[in-house]
Amino acid sequence: MDCYTANWDPLGEAAYYRKLDLYSMDWRVDLRDCLVAAAPYGGPIALLKTRKEKSPSSRPPLEIYSASGVLLASTPWKNSPAVHLGWTTSEDLLCIQEDGSVLVYSIFCEFKRRFTMGNEVLQNHVLEAKVFHTEFGTGVAILTGAHRFTMATNVDDLKLRRLPEVPGLQKPPSCWTVLCLDRATIILLAVGHDLFLLDNTTCSPVTLPGLSPYAGAYLQMAVSFNYRYLALFTDTGYIWMGRSHLKEKLGEFTCEFRAPPKQMVWCTRSRSKQRAVVMAWDRRLLVAGNTEQCIQYPLDEDSYLVPELDGVRIFSRLAHEFLHEIPEASQEIFRIASMAPGALLLEAQKEYEKESQKADEYLREIKDQKLLSEAVRQCIEAASYENQPDIQKSLLRAASFGKCFLEKFSPEPFVETCRDLRVLNALRDYQIGIPLSFDQYRQLTTEVLLDRLVLRRLYPIAIKICEYLRLSEFQGISRILAHWACYKVQQQENSDEEVAQAINQKLGDTPGISYAEIAARAYECGRTELAIKLLEYEPRSGKQVPLLLKMKRSPLALSKAIESGDTDLVYTVVLHLKNELNRGTFFMTLQNQPVALSLYRQFCKHQELDTLKDLYNQDDDHQELGNFHVRSGYVSEKRIDGRIACLQNAVDEYYKAKNEFAAKATEDQIKLLRLQRHLQDDFDKPYLDYSLHDTVYNLILDGNHKRAEQLYRDFKIPDKRFWWLKINALAEREDWDELEKFSKGKKSPIGYLPFVEICMKHHNRYEARKFAPRVASEQRVKAFILVGDLDQAAEAAIERKNEGEMTLVLSKCTAATDASVVAKINQAKAQLGKK
């Protein structure tokens, strides 16, 4: 703490920069011999040796290390020479080859996929390439041997763009970079003293604002991490710095070096007081801003710069460092002779630990200025930017000490900072090797961090972080365990049974776990039996069945679908089996599954009638075959002869099924169809497809009484039913004479009240009166009431001495018109009462 500011270097009057030691690298590599790619946010480092070995049979290795220099994986490079390496936002490695092919590897050197950048790149080869990140994803830009640019803004959704040609360009540009402006991705390139912008359709020359007349030719350019700022280096050592839209200059600097730097990157952070450009030569690192001064650091060997959100990582064969601008809170507290409230609070806490009265003096001074809340905030903020746990603890103790003297102070910033720092300190451990800063952690988010830990197979620490941050309710742990299980199935060390039991013991019924996804990974790894065992633990049949079908385990999939009770799932499997198996095997499979067979029959009734017939024939199901022929006769056959033939087949099947009733009924239907065809031919009226009753009714309605009588006799229609049909049809035809004649032909089996009712239904009171006297005595009162003859109704009721019927007649009488009827009934009721 006493020498805390020893590594501070001023850049201008308001800003200080420092280099923090992250790791002592334990690898044995020479960066001069390698293509190097380092992922941001403390990501992994990829190395591919480019120098040819003496032995032609030896292959250069592709190696991936953590940021602390721990080897994660390596593999021999068996492909054509690579031109450039880069990392995607999901930490997949892109290896761009001379022929324009891009190979995608995982963090453990596992080949994932390959894509090409088009025929034009293939024909002219790749001179230079850059991997960049935008809001659309990870992109690739290629400069070909024909001095043309090809670009893809998202490698996960590959859409190639060939940019316009630069007029008069006969050699490669001296430098170029990718800019992202207003959601558009363009290329800025330099040819000597000239600059050009390439978009989708045009090539436009541009001029930098405020450019010195002694600038010279452009040799190097760099865009900031967030694409907001641009810097260019010229052959006179002049550096122009401005905004990437090329309309505003931020500053300039002239250095003593004329050769272009090996790397040039921006070093910025949010609320930066002095944005800087960092340049690396063989043995020198230079930090330049908008001031006359610069900062220079010696480099003992080749180093590589990695731009970050809030600084620059610098790694070499021996060390890994972080260069950044010191935040305001740290400057205020640790600046020599600082009287800032945070500095006084830190001193007060130290004196308190010494049990010195000076602690009270420092506190009083802060309170008198009413800056105690500000002092606590400064200490919390400064602690978040520190890498050393001892300094973090000292600042947080000071903040905790100051909080005790505040009545109203939200504890959340203090608690969150303590929690986040504990996570960051664990990640910065040498074995983990993820040197995230506080700002990078907040930008990356906890969810993405957990995904990256899982990607590196660091399951224990990922679970510990979930538990510490209490992310279980968001299924953080379940997601990690699922990834662990998927990794477990890829190992070939144990038997399928042992692996399945180990995974189940670890995962159990953890919410959010999908055993089907783990089983799918096992199947992809060629462990089909393990996948089947894992699926036994999957509670959702909808997840089990599709994977079983994919694994060619259709009978098991059918059993699982039936057990689920989900008919849609059963149909899915059955139709899959139908397409997969030959017809005989398919039918035999269904025979062993009655539920599936029944559902398939239902399907065939609506979709495949011929298949349904085959199913019934195979089962010798004559009853259903008869039903099938009846249904097909009326659904499929339009001609009457064809329909009769189908019905005759149905008769044969019903007799085989010993269902005489159905056979006789079908024979009657055939007989009816033939008669209806004759009637239709004779009377030129449609009779086909009428029921027997409708046929008789229409014949009577058309006056064909003899034909109706013939059907009545031939089909043995019950008398009552025939009489009802006939009187209704005659009334509808208004053939009252025939109705009266019919009523006198023989005694009516339905009585004569229906004659009265049917006449009144057709509003013919006159005809109804003819039938009322013929109605049976017990219904005569009702008949006379229907025809409106209350006097006769009263007579009939008195004759039957039925008091209920008398009351009914009285209810129909009115005092004005039916006084005599009322008197007659009252007298009869009185006489009944005397008895």
Image: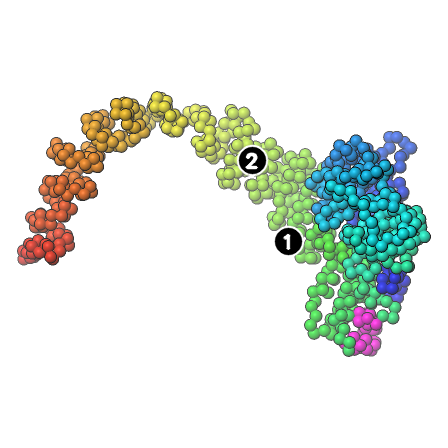
Label 1 belongs to which residue? 474
Q: Could you say which is closer to the camera, residue 18 or residue 413?
A: 18
Q: Residue at x 65, y 49 (%)?
A: 478
The stretch of residues the image draws in magenta is 339-367
Asked if residue 757 can be seen in this view, the reply is no
Residue sitting nearer the eye, 309 or 386: 309
Q: Give the mark nearer the N terminus: 2 vs 1.
A: 1
Tell me the SS state at disc 1.
Answer: helix
Label 1 environment density (alpha carbons within 10 Å; few <14, some 14–19, many ≥20): few
Q: Which mark is residue 557?
A: 2
Residue 354 belongs to the span the image colors magenta? yes
Number of labelled discs? Answer: 2
* Position of 635 relative to 762 (above/below): above
Does residue 625 appear left or right of residue 376 in this picture? Answer: left
Residue occupying the point 44% across, 28% down: 609
| Residue type, label 1 | Phe
Residue 784 in sight in this render: yes
Q: Nearer the viewer, residue 89 or 418?
A: 89
Give the quadrant of residue 757. Answer: top left
